[in-house]
Image (tube, rainbow, N blue to C red):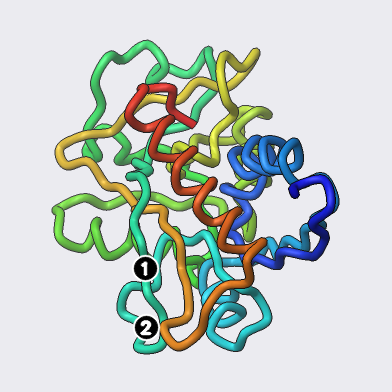
Amino acid sequence: MGDRQSGQVTLACVPTAAFYFLPRVIERFNVQFPLIRFRILDLSANEALESVARGEAEFGINFTGSSHPGLTFTPLVDDPIVLACRHDHPLARRRTLSWKDLEGQALIGVSRNSGNRQLLDVALSKMNVQLNFFYEVNHLTTALGLVERGLGISVLPKLATPPGDHRIIVTKPIGNPEIKRTIGIVERRASRLSPAAQRFRDLLAESWRHRALSGAGF
């Protein structure tokens, strides 16, 4: 049946999930359904939500959306905000870090219009911490490029950091308190997924839960 079923799945996905996690699941899906094509709308969090709400995408992978009246949000995994710095940076030798430890550092942050930045700003507003965002970029990959050049350090979701051992960049957890976003599946309340999209959505949820339970990370 899988060899003969054709069609297309359109989904809206935040870029970090699209780059680091989605390809593995698509690869598994293609083994079962090699004729089903994919259209991936890699958009910012707010743009991806609107794409699902308007029906341009059948469903989405996002870290927000539970408060949208026309959407449902199924949480899958927590994605903590971590520090990214060069191997030779003094903070790279620290075993534990708090947000206070980042005061006075030249930070590379994403635009204030970004969903990730808004999440961070809301959390920091509840703490007595003053961070110095010396650089502002639109994409997390740009932030990592500046970190590689030694221009500063960055705080970004773990999912956006290089997987495994990187030759230049190290990541460190930040506690006291931990700030995290929740990645999940966004769907329209008043619609039903196509058979192909439903199968992929179920595989996506199963794969992500399996990795979280096994401790494999992202």
| Residue 54 quadrant | bottom right
Classify mark 2: residues with Cα within 10 Å, few (<14), some (14-19) or many (20+): some
Residue at the image position 64 percent from the left and 49 percent from the top: 18
Identify the element where label 1 is drawn: strand
Of labels 2 and 1, the one closer to you: 1
Q: Are marks 2 and 1 in contact (CB under 8 Å)?
A: yes
User: Which residue shows up at 56% across the image and 82% down it?
Assistant: 50
- Which residue lies most toward the front here? 1
The residue under the point 56% across, 52% down is 135
In space, the residues marked 2 and 1 are separated at their CA atoms by 9 Å
101 above or below 177? above
| Residue under label 2 | 68
The amino acid type, in three-letter code, at marker 2 is His
Circle 1 packing at 10 Å, graded few (<14), some (14-19), many (20+), is many
- Residue 29: x and y in percent read 68, 43
Image mark for residue 47? none
| Image spot of residue 162 (x, y percent) | 59, 29
Query: Which of the pair 57/175 is nearer the observer?
Result: 57
Q: Which residue is mark 1?
A: 73
139, above or below 101, in the image: below
Name the N-terminal-most of marks 2 and 1.
2
Instruction: Report the amino acid beneath label 1.
Output: Phe
Q: Nearer the viewer, residue 152 or 68?
A: 68
